[in-house]
Amino acid sequence: MGGPCPLCTGACVYVWFDALVNYLSALGWQDGDPRFEHYWPHTVHLMAKDIVRFHSVIWPIVLMAADIPLPRTIFGHGWLLLEGGKMSKSKGNVVDPLVLIDRYGVDAVRYYLLRELPNGGDSYYSEDDLINRINTDLANDLGNLISRTLGMVQKYQGGFIAAAGIPQGPDSDLINCAMQVKDELEEQLEHLDFSNALTAIWKLVRRANRYVDETTPWNLVRDPGKKERLQTVLYNLSEAVRLLTIWCSPFMPVFPERVFEQFGIAGRLDLQTWESTGKWGLLPANLQVETGPGVFPRIQVEEDKEKLSVKPQEEKPQKQRKPQKPQITIDDFDRVDLRVALVKNVEKIKGADRLLKVELDLGSETRTVVAGIAQHYTPDSLVGKRVVIVANLAPVKLRGVTSSGMILAASEGDDLGVLTVEREIPPGATVK
């Protein structure tokens, strides 16, 4: 770290003293480079919390001695921890980020790290959690919203985005949500709280997915009298995708270019700026979209197990065939009322690590179901999904909450997955 100073006996000069000057020289300090005057007054120095003292005491002294304005902010972020503690080159427990980027893409890795690392706190790294974030937040939520919007514009309107009509009902809710998200997002960014900034963005992601279910474009297209309404719905979804893409670009800089190309605004830089998100409805009509592969493909964990950067597992013994339950007749099966339900809201139940309180839309009614899936799903990852439930199960009270039904799920060992419906089947539909 340092050694005796040749000019001062007993003093110590740290090699970081020289490293700090890189902050200045990188911007062309003393070379007349306009970048220094442009960027330095807004400088925010981000660093790990264990080196904050050096940067917040010694570094400012150096700057003041050189008559250079101090950085606007010095922020110490937390550590990424493994089960063995802090990542360390000396311990040899470092996860190679280049390997992760090669496997999952830079956007996915950046999203996971920024979403999981709390403001100023530590967070544990897990590749399983990384994959879960990719599959739930990026593939299921944001990626699916983009794909559905492009697909419906292509299928229902010949690939052209038409002008929006007068807002109705859920239109205003969607627009208000977008403007509220912008305010909250900018407030979180001002505090360098990237995790909660992404949480704010995902409020519009979830709201836009619910908007699809509320407006049912697949039903509007069947009614010639609803043509203008269909145009409005698809315009609003396209505009929501534009805003979301811009807001996500500081966190995930690669995928926005693909989205802008697919929505026909690759050459419209004025529609890609942060300032353009301050007003709803700037997306011009008659844009031609192009569908393509999903921007965030799902990670097939079972097929790609050899790709996971986890410790080698011992060879598992041959699975024993599970005994089948006694046969039933079709009349027995008919007694079970299976329905499609849309997840509207999910909350954790205090004092119960495994239980979630799930609010379900069954079309003609709303129900509450208690599900023991909290160790496999976060509340946010379930909202907007179409699940299959046993609708005629006798109500039972669990932890003070009346559960009227049961969400179906498949499990194998420690793994569990909720049964979902891929197509836009309306809530309340019978499962046969």
Image: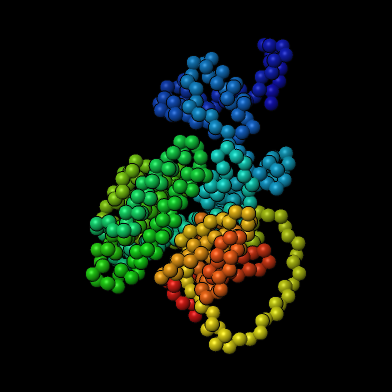
Observer-nearest of 47 and 211: 211
| Image: 66 above or below 407 | above
Residue 127 rendering spot, x and y as whole percentages: 62, 53
Q: Residue at image x 32%, y 56%? A: 171
Observer-nearest of 207 and 150: 207
Residue 17 rendering spot, x and y as whole percentages: 61, 22
Query: Residue 429 is drawn in which quadrant?
Result: bottom left
Is residue 264 in view?
A: no
Q: Residue at image x 66%, y 44%? A: 81
Is residue 205 in view?
A: yes
Residue 106 rendering spot, x and y as whole percentages: 52, 49
Query: Residue 165 is drawn in which quadrant?
Result: bottom left
Q: Residue at image x 25%, y 66%? A: 227
Residue 139 rendering spot, x and y as whole percentages: 49, 59
Observer-nearest of 29 and 312: 312
Observer-nearest of 34 and 270: 270
